[in-house]
Amino acid sequence: MTLSADRPVVLIAEELAPAALEVLADDFDVRHVDGTDRPKLLAALADAHAIIVRSATKVDAEAIAAGPRLKVVARAGVGLDNVEVPAATARGVMVVNAPTSNIVSAAEQAVALLLAVARHTASASTALKNGEWKRSKYTGVEIVGKTVGVVGLGRIGVLFAQRMAAFGTRLIAYDPYIQPARAAALGVRLVGLDELLRESDFISIHLPKTPETVGLIGAKELAQVKPGVRIVNAARGGLIDEQALADAIEEGRVGGAGIDVYAKEPCTSSPLFKFDNVVATPHLGASTNEAQDKAGLAVAKSVKLALQGEFVPDA
Ligand code: NAD
Ligand code: MLT
């Protein structure tokens, strides 16, 4: 073990699985900071050789400039939309993530939200706990035989589709970057976005957040949906325009929504929260013991290798 003063500093800016901290403890000076407290984050970066974040910490050009010794930015999870990768690359700072660590958890969360929206699980539970035994008010719909539209047939979209296939659904997907043969092998028919909007009884979004995808589902798209469609977003806030979705629910065009992610997080106020037929969770897609262990361990190992000057394989 090296003396603390000589050890490279690894800054942990969000909660990390204990197993991951163990990987780092012997070789590095592990320090903690609240990544959402900007002044404290920037000050702590002054000494840091590596920083590990989840989705709440913004590692932008300013943050990278505040870390003159920075060699690695590690994202304990999938989405890199909170890391300004070009700014890191320009400074020669490596960016690593754990792209498969939480995909099963995220897909399961999307399925859970879809089922909860179909059967009014959350609102019926709240009502019952408040002393209301109302059965007919919470009549839902079956999943079997319904058309499920997957927007973004990547790692999580595929896992979601495979799980929905087990419910006896008809699966369609919009993803211009996927070969039709690959989709067909999964039992999914690739369609254009307009057709997906028109035909789906349920829509689930599994896109990355990029300049191209922000606001992809807005008022114009929601005007085309099959009346009563139920929509799930456990990918990224802002892919669906929250106000446009609230307007469509108000008008009854959209029959319900399951939302895990918000344009601005943390989010404690949204035009969607007033609806009984909206199930809202606070970005819990990756919040399972298994996903957190996998994500934390993967990035801790990558950080260790990078700071020791070793080759870093894909996590
Ligand atoms: P992925 O990169 O494997 O798949 C994304 C898919 O979207 C790809 O197939 C790509 O071709 C497609 N795509 C890209 N741009 C598109 C466009 N303009 N139109 C249509 N399709 C497009 O990503 P993934 O691992 O499946 O993750 C999906 C999303 O889930 C990401 O936003 C990720 O950050 C998010 N996520 C959320 C949670 C959570 O906690 N809620 C957990 C993990 C991941
Ligand atoms: C991810 O992109 O990995 C998820 O949003 C989960 C997280 O931020 O921890």
Image (cartoon, grey):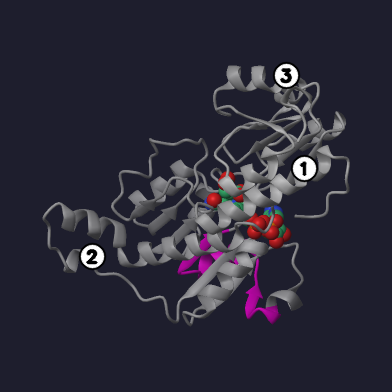
In what element is the residue under mark 2? helix
- Give the mark nearer the N terminus: 1 vs 2: 2
Q: Tag 1: residue type?
A: Lys
Name the quadrant where ligand 1 sits. Answer: bottom right
Q: Is residue 83 visible?
A: yes
- Give the mark nearer the N terminus: 2 vs 3: 3
The residue at label 2 has a CB less than 8 Å from ligand 1: no
Q: Residue at x 76, y 42 (%)?
A: 303
Q: Quadrant of residue 117?
A: bottom left
Question: What is the distance, in whole Å, between disc 1 and disc 2 at their CAs?
Answer: 52 Å
Q: How crowded is the residue under tag 3: few (<14 C-alpha within 10 Å), some, or many (20+)? A: some
Q: How crowded is the residue under tag 2: few (<14 C-alpha within 10 Å), some, or many (20+)? A: some
Please identify, in this view, whether the residue under mark 1 or under mark 2 is nearer the observer.
1
Q: Which mark is residue 138?
A: 2
Asked whether residue 204 is drawn in magenta, I would say yes
Residue labelled with disc 1: 304
Q: Is residue 11 left or right of residue 197?
A: right
Part of the protein shown in magenta: 184-205
Residue labelled with disc 3: 46
Q: Is residue 181 left or right of residue 133?
A: right
